[in-house]
Every structure is written in C-alpha cells, then in structure tokens.
Amino acid sequence: MLKTTFLICFLLNLSLAENNSYDDLFSKYGSLYNLHPNLLKAIAKTESNLNPNAINKTNKNGTIDRGLMQINSIHLNDGLDAEDLFDPEINIHEGAKVLRYCIDKHGLTWQALNCYNGKIQNNDYNLKVLSNLEKLNNITAKPINYASRTHPSKSSEVRKFIIKQ
C-alpha cells in the first residue's frame, strides 16, 4: 500500500513538473508581448501537447510546423533555420510574436486564435485552445454557441486569461 501511494505521488509530481518545465519561458514572452502566459501554454498544449520535438509535415501547402508552438516554416525569415525551432525559448518567442500579430490584427476574438493556426474561417482551433485554457485555469465556461462561432471566452472569467490586464 505504501509503495503504491509513493508511486502514484511520484508520477503525479513528475507529471506536474513536466507540464511546468516551460512556465518561465511562457511568462517571459507573455510579458514581452503582453499576453497571459497560460494562453501561450494552452496554445502549446493544443499544438504539440507540450512536446518541443513535435513535427507536423501534413500541411497542404508543403510547409512544416515545428516545436512546442508548432511554428510554421514560413516564419523562418528572422535569421532562423528549421533546427532553431526545436529550441523551446526560440519557439515560444516566435509563437508569442505570431499570436501578438494576430491579436493586433483581429482584436481579442476567436479569429485571432484561428489566425495563429493559419485559417480564420471554418476552423474550430479556437475552441480547442480555449478548452485547454479553461483546464489550465481550472475554470468552467458556459456552453459554446456554435451557430454564431462565439465562445464563452467573451465572459470576463476566461477572457482575462487571453491578454494580460
């Protein structure tokens, strides 16, 4: 019994430590781009399940997404090469930069989150991010209104985590 309890506690602690291993970077670049760190973390959870070595080669346009935030190869114009995107610090920095651009362009809307994913319309990406954000912040939102493509993120409880107040 004691061995089982110890093993469960060890695995829970390992799981929590693994999930928090990039929190300092989410905070650093969230602060730099005026974004809540949990929003960046929710995107990383949605994109790669927090895997810094994740690769997606299934884009229809032939581009490749890499790393925690799944930065697309079209963003390799700042002196970065593809391998740089496996560095969590570079990847989170680039992801925060892309998200800030999207929020500046579309406002604090579901379109901004979909912009990060590269497709504004007919895309439920924003709902996946917001679901992960709700889990991270341990809050429950009202049911989603699919007809209007709005999400309870417009409520202040979830919305406050999208951008630093």
Image (tube, rainbow, N blue to C red):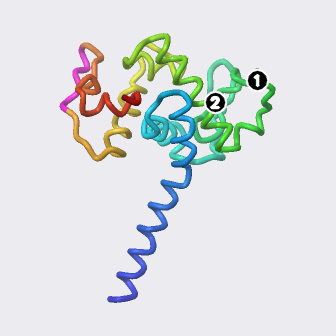
Q: Which of the 4 quarters of the picture holds residue 90?
A: top right
**Relative to 6, is 57 on the left or the right?**
right
Please state the horizontal and vertical placement of residue 27, each as a whole percent of the image. Answer: 51, 42
Q: Residues within 10 Å of mark 1 (few under 14, many from 20)?
A: few
Seen from the viewer's position, the closer of residues 45 and 164 is 164
- Residue kind at label 1, given as amino acid type: Asp
Secondary structure of residue under mark 2: helix
Question: Which of the two discs, 1 and 2, labels the residue nearer the N terminus?
Answer: 1
The quadrant the C terminus occupies is top left
- Residue kind at label 2, given as amino acid type: Glu
Please state the horizontal and vertical placement of residue 83, each as a whole percent of the image. Answer: 77, 39
Q: Which residue is mark 2?
A: 94
Q: Which of the 4 quarters of the picture holds residue 124?
A: top left
Q: Which residue is mark 1?
A: 78
Q: Is 14 rendered above or below residue 165?
A: below
Please state the horizontal and vertical placement of residue 69, each as a whole percent of the image. Answer: 57, 36
Which residue shows up at 51% across the image and 34% down it? 31
Q: Is 82 rendered above or below residue 112?
A: below
Q: Is 39 rendered above or below residue 19?
A: above
Q: CA distance from mark 1 to mark 2?
A: 10 Å
Please state the horizontal and vertical placement of residue 112, each as a whole percent of the image. Answer: 44, 18
**Residue 18: image tag:** none
Seen from the viewer's position, the closer of residues 63 and 40 is 40
Which residue shows up at 76% across the image and 38% down it? 84
Secondary structure of residue under mark 1: loop
Q: Which of the 4 quarters of the picture holds residue 16?
A: bottom left
Boundaries of the magenta span? 142-147
Residue 87 covered by magenta stretch: no
